[in-house]
Image (cartoon, helix red, strand yellow):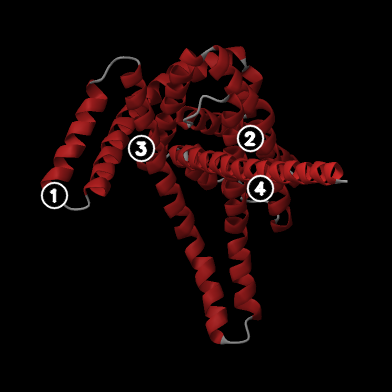
Amino acid sequence: MSGLLALLDDVAAIVKLTATQLDDLASQTAKVGAKVGATVLDDAAKAGAKAAGVVIDDAAVTPKYVTGLPAARELPIIWKIARASFFNKLVILLPAALLLDAFLPWLVTPMLMLGGCYLCFEGAEKIWHILYPHPESKAQVAEVIDAAHLEEQRVKGAIKTDFILSAEIMTISLAAIETDSRLSAGIVLAVVAIGITALVYGTVAILVKMDDAGLKLSQIGRVEAVRSFGRGIVKFMPTLMMIIATIGTAAMLWVGGNIIVHGVDVLGWHWPYETIKGIATSVSDSLGVAKGFVKWVVTATLDGILGLALGLILIPIVTRLIVPVFSIFFPEKQAAH
């Protein structure tokens, strides 16, 4: 009997020890999971911040694709573009980015710089067209083509533009990730892709319907204050879109210039990076207040000026060389535009 009691006592001790170990394991697993989750979110936040210029421009560009189309088709069109954007980022670009990082990591910086040149060109071209507008840049009149065909053309054009911007977002994000784990990198890229796409197209959906909401308030408001607020929304929307477009252009030039500066530094030409860093440090030290913010503003401004200069140089190269060559090999694409 005493032997049985001793055996049961040993079993109870083993069960207690096992429970303690499982509790410790669960606790450690939770800590590791929380740490990994925090790291993923931190990397995703850094990557998203690096891609800010492209994100803002994406949000600023997309509303033009629903201009001139029936109001009832605006949200369905945005959903079509958003769905294609999710596919572009998650199914095509994410695996491509991971494969590139795994087998051709040396190619990431040149591709990133190529995307930076694209941002500089786009930003400079927007400014150039404001200063020297072309007659063909005026808004298209929807009546020249049936609504269904126009919608199809707009969606195709938006998806192509989104693919280019998405490729830039994913490349910038990949370069900003600070992890050696392919799994963690893939998770971060997926979080960035989902988060940015939802943010961009959710914002676009709100923007394109704000004037409709304002018009509705101006018509059904029971008190004059509500009706006046609705009219104010309608009047302010063109200004808001102009502000967003301006911020997007500035962000493109800043991010594009920053990518080029860091790229040439990685490739061995340190003078641009060191010079900008030195100027920013000198200015922030001389002012003596908000040094971090001042340093960022000076750096972003100098990067933006460099990006604008590079973009202006690229405009004739693209318009007089690359576009004509492209039209020779793909005449049907050129005609479609």
SS at mark 2? helix
Amino acid at the residue labelled 4: Ala
Residue linked to disc 2: 157
Tell which residue pokes out farthest to the bottom in this image: 223
In this rendering, is residue 203 above or below 187?
below
Tell which residue pokes out farthest to the left in this image: 286
Tell whether label 1 touches label 3 (CB within 8 Å).
no
Mark 3 Cα-neighbour bin, 10 Å: few <14, some 14–19, many ≥20: many
Q: Earlier in the sequence, mark 2 or mark 4?
A: 4
SS at mark 3? helix
**Residue 319 in view here:** no
Amino acid at the residue labelled 3: Trp
Mark 1 Cα-neighbour bin, 10 Å: few <14, some 14–19, many ≥20: few
Estimate the spatial distance between the alpha carbons at disc 4 and disc 1, rounded to whole Å.
54 Å
Tell whether label 1 touches label 4 (CB within 8 Å).
no
Residue linked to disc 3: 254
Quadrant for the C terminus, please.
Answer: top right
Residue 54 point in image, percent of width and height: 48, 38
Amino acid at the residue labelled 1: Leu
Residue linked to disc 1: 287
In this rendering, is residue 209 above or below 317?
below
Q: Nearer the viewer, residue 281 or 52?
A: 281
Residue linked to disc 4: 142
SS at mark 1? helix
Q: Earlier in the sequence, mark 1 or mark 2?
A: 2
Q: Is residue 161 left or right of residue 284?
A: right
